[in-house]
Image (cartoon, rainbow, N blue to C red):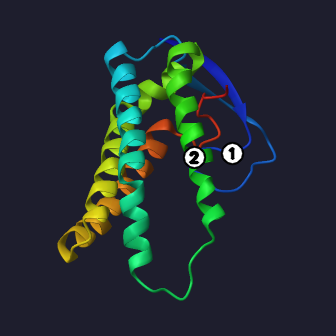
Amino acid sequence: MQRKKVVGLLKSDETELDPEPFETEVEDQTDEQPSMALRVGNSVSFVLAILANFIFAQGQGAVAFEYIVKISPKEYAFSIWFVIYSLLGGFVYLQYFDEKFGSIVKAIGPWFIVSNFFNGLWMYTFTKNTVLTISLAALVLFAIMASNLIILQLARSFKVDNNHSI
């Protein structure tokens, strides 16, 4: 593993910009590639999450329309999911074809798979429409959120020196 110097204005333990730039050494992780098993696992879990969304989409709409609510988004608002899944598909694609992207995939590890599992599980539990499964669906939503926060933490996507410039 190589080390390289990074120049920045914000140190990791500070919240305000320092007018004087600093230099620090960080590990260059671009030469580390994730295993093929991890890449395939990411791909398979993504495809299964997409399938779960297609299989259970009708049931999800039926459950949503069964209850009268005073505030409900227009149908076109749900088109955001096309953008989200397109970006996730881009993640799956890039893990195979962009060498610099390998460090991100390796840092995340199996958490993308875990997030996709919870996504499919949420679709299943929500569409069963019983008090127990709707309650479980709420817990699964928290699990999705937790796994996505772990992914953000592991990818260091919020830090200046994350070394993930693509």
Residue 146 marker: none
Question: Could you tell me which residue is drawn at 51 percent across and 10 percent down?
Answer: 31
Determine whether label 1 and label 2 are within 8 Å by CB.
no
Mark-to-mark CA distance, 1 and 2: 30 Å
Q: In the rendered view, does 41 fall on the left or right side of 61?
A: left
Which of marks 2 and 1 precedes in the sequence? 1
Residue 84 marker: 2
User: What amino acid type is highlighted by mark number 2?
Assistant: Ile
Question: Could you tell me which residue is drawn at 62 percent across and 34 percent down?
Answer: 161
User: What amino acid type is highlighted by mark number 1?
Assistant: Leu
Q: In the rendered view, does 93 fall on the left or right side of 47?
A: right
Badge 2 density bin: few <14, some 14–19, many ≥20, Cα 10 Å: few
Element type where label 1 sits in the image: loop
Element type where label 2 sits in the image: helix
Instruction: Name the residue tied to disc 1.
Output: 10
Front residue of 147 and 27: 147
Horizontal and vertical percent position of residue 149: 44, 51
Question: Could you tell me which residue is drawn at 53 percent across and 32 percent down?
Answer: 89
